[in-house]
Image (cartoon, helix red, strand yellow):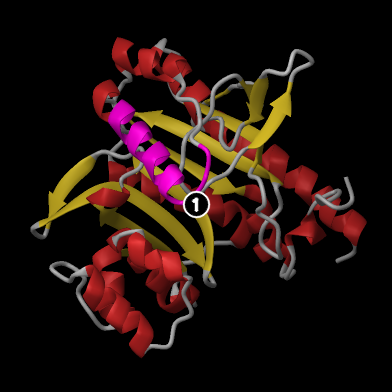
Amino acid sequence: MNRIAILQDRASMLAKTRTFFASRKILEVDCPLITSKASVDAHIDLIPVLEPDGSKRWLHSSPEYGMKRLLSEGIGDIYQLAHVFRQGEYGVKHNPEFMMAEWYRLGIPFAAMIDETIEYIRLFLGNLPYNLISYRQAFIDYAGFDYVGMSEKDLLDYIKEKDIAFYPSIENEGKDALLNLILGVLIEPRLGENSLCALAYYPASQAALAQRCLRDREETAERFEVYYKGIELANGYHELADAEEQGNRLVEANEHRIALGKDPLPIDEHFLEALKTGLPDACGVAVGFDRLMMLRHNVSAIKDVMPFNWEQA
């Protein structure tokens, strides 16, 4: 399919996305792309926007904070089709500016949110079967070990034994960094080989913005990601609603940034105040629209499904 035909199909899939949400009575919202405060993540760097007076704002990496503020005001189920921005993320599967479909559902069970995400992905890829596997089980099945009870030294020894390339500072970044290296090199490429795969129930230490639960004597996060042919397509959560806990996690994320040699980011007090007023019980997910288009058209580079990529814009 030529470039123009792909862009015409892109427009069609944007329309089908809106129909998908409208049929479920999920309201479209349009939160700002430029924010005065930042979403804080140790591993996501934001693109700054300088005001004439020298003050700084940021292109958002997700509309999440704004959408949760609306949820706290009582808006109900919502979605946003948003351009989002992440500094330095450039490659065959990455572009610093890309399209994300993000939505939040009130009172929906965690498992049902996974099912709905799969339904959305099937709009693009057809009626593929899917399976769910826990993060812990994925390590048992694909890496050959159960990480619960293992030390950082055990994991580092495993990495060296498997001859997995690593940067020296990872030895000081903790257990999660070591697990995620193994996940990225040995496990993710095998997820969704012949079907959609939902990877769920991450370690609680990787909860990010998710609620926690005890599962098989392990404290886990109600978080999931969806993969197809080794490509991550979605990242979802049973959303954390505790403002104090959320504030603590943002502080921890900034501390992690500093440990990685990065600048800390200003915490969004508007977001935390919204949580204090009461975020309803909700699940949320973000899905990479451009990656779905890549798989839909069987192209190897994300630039092939965009009007213009970062170098062309």
The number of discs equals 1
- Residue 299 point in image, percent of width and height: 74, 69
Residue interval drawn in magenta? 246-263
Looking at the image, the residue that sits furthest to the left is: 217
User: Is residue 265 one of those drawn in magenta?
Assistant: no
Relative to 281, 78 lies left or right: right
- Whether residue 142 is situated above or below residue 196 in the rendered picture: below
Identify the residue at image location x=43%, y=64%: 169
Quadrant for residue 80, please give it: top right
User: Does the rendering let one see residue 194?
Assistant: no
Which of the pair 285/19 is nearer the observer?
285
User: The residue under label 1 is which amino acid type?
Assistant: Ala
Identify the residue at image location x=39%, y=50%: 115
- Residue 308 point in image, percent of width and height: 86, 49
Relative to 163, 297 lies left or right: right
Identify the residue at image location x=49%, y=31%: 24
Quadrant for residue 281, please give it: top left
Which of the pair 303/43 is nearer the observer?
43
State which quarter of the image contains the N terminus: bottom right
Residue holding disc 1:
234
What kind of secondary structure does the magenta stretch mostly adopt? Answer: helix
- Whether residue 212 is situated above or below residue 293 in the rendered picture: above
User: Is residue 261 one of those drawn in magenta?
Assistant: yes
- Residue 136 point in image, percent of width and height: 24, 66
